Amino acid sequence: MELMRAARLHIPSRTLTIEEVPRPVAGPGQVLVKVEAAGVCLSDVHLIDGSLTPTHLRRETVTLGHEVAGTIAELGRDVTAWAVGQRVVLQAGDIRDGLVLTRGVDYDGGWAEYALASVDTLFHLPDTIPFEQAAIIPDAVSTPWGAITATAEVRPAQAVGVWGVGGLGAHAVQLLRAVGACPIIAVDPLPAARRRALEFGADVALDPADPRLREQVLTATGGRALEVAFDFAGAAVVREQALTLLAPRGRLVLVGLADKALTVADGALFSYQQHQILGHYGSAVDAVPQLVALVEGGRLDFSRSITDVLPLADATKAVQRLHTKEGDPIRLILRP
């Protein structure tokens, strides 16, 4: 039995350890992927700190990592459309028995030397796209892409606000620029995050604690207020603030995960203005290939998103850096 290294999270104790575990074997409809890059996401931090718990995990321990890119190392016996050595990026989850499962949460993910993937979750990765940049497309890029294009249905020239310019919000700014939103107003309490927002294409970057925030938003939008607001922070105070800055028929899209109650301070005004609150999670199955095509075609560039690359042995260090925001990371990558 061949062994491999993997970063395993014991859910009851929330203990993350690097362990030697059996190397998986590709079964029917599966391939074994040699992991070349795996992203570290804030949801991984939440799994470790206990604020997020897997819904469908059948064991007490799971290999983390839902942002994965690599090369095919082994084919299941009935797999004919793929070949050993092909470069691939993996969808962040899978549909099994009618359930939507998340890789690295509900089943073993890519913080390991090898990862299993069903053929339905594989996408070809062109040679021109580095593994590190490809790995973050599922989730870090595809989640805001789905929120923008599918849930919010943002149209060109619409005024849009982005609360929280971290791993998802920074990409949202870039993607909103690509689809023609204008103006793009970023809101974040951290000066470094506001600077990053402007670098990624925001027209204005504001501090949510500024007493002139509403005035600044109205100035930037020519008095229109926001047609769409995105909460990438998952904080009740963010959602309450964003609601006060919506234009008539404006939409608030909740992307950041939170287990706190959402309150609408003025229900009558909410109804009169015909506001909407929309929840968003993940992305459609076509999001990853769309984004790969846009990167390959030169429309998008995620080279600035890779803050650092660390060895798998430093998984705990990577999680701590993301938790404390040391070095102002957008995405940290683990390389087995």
Image (cartoon, helix red, strand yellow):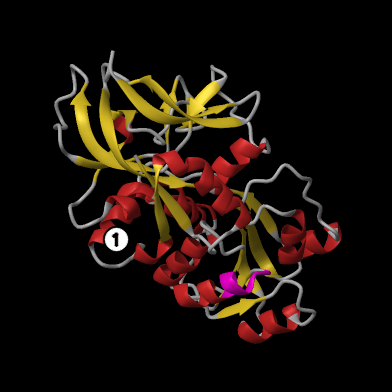
Identify which residue is drawn at 85% across, 59% down.
Answer: 265
Main SS of the magenta part reads helix
Dividing the picture into quadrants, the one containing residue 145 is bottom left
> Eyeballing the image, is 287 above or below 70?
below
Magenta extent? 189-194
**Residue density around tag 1, few if under 14, some if 14–19, many if 20 or more, within 10 Å:** few
Kind of residue indicated by mark 1: Leu
Q: Is residue 66 at least partly visible in the picture?
A: no
Q: Is residue 233 at least partly visible in the picture?
A: yes
- 113 falls in the magenta region: no
Q: Quadrant of the C terminus?
A: top left
* Residue 35 in picture, x, y percent from top left: 31, 38
> What residue is pinned by disc 1?
294
Element carrying mark 1:
helix
> Eyeballing the image, is 145 above or below 280?
below
* Residue 29 in picture, x, y percent from top left: 26, 21
Identify which residue is drawn at 81% across, 56% down.
Answer: 264
Instruction: Depth check: give the residue in front, 47 or 157.
Output: 47
Q: Quadrant of the N terminus?
A: top left
* Residue 118 in picture, x, y percent from top left: 31, 27
Dividing the picture into quadrants, the one containing residue 72 is top left
Identify which residue is drawn at 22% across, 38% down.
Answer: 71
Identify which residue is drawn at 60% across, 30% down.
Answer: 15
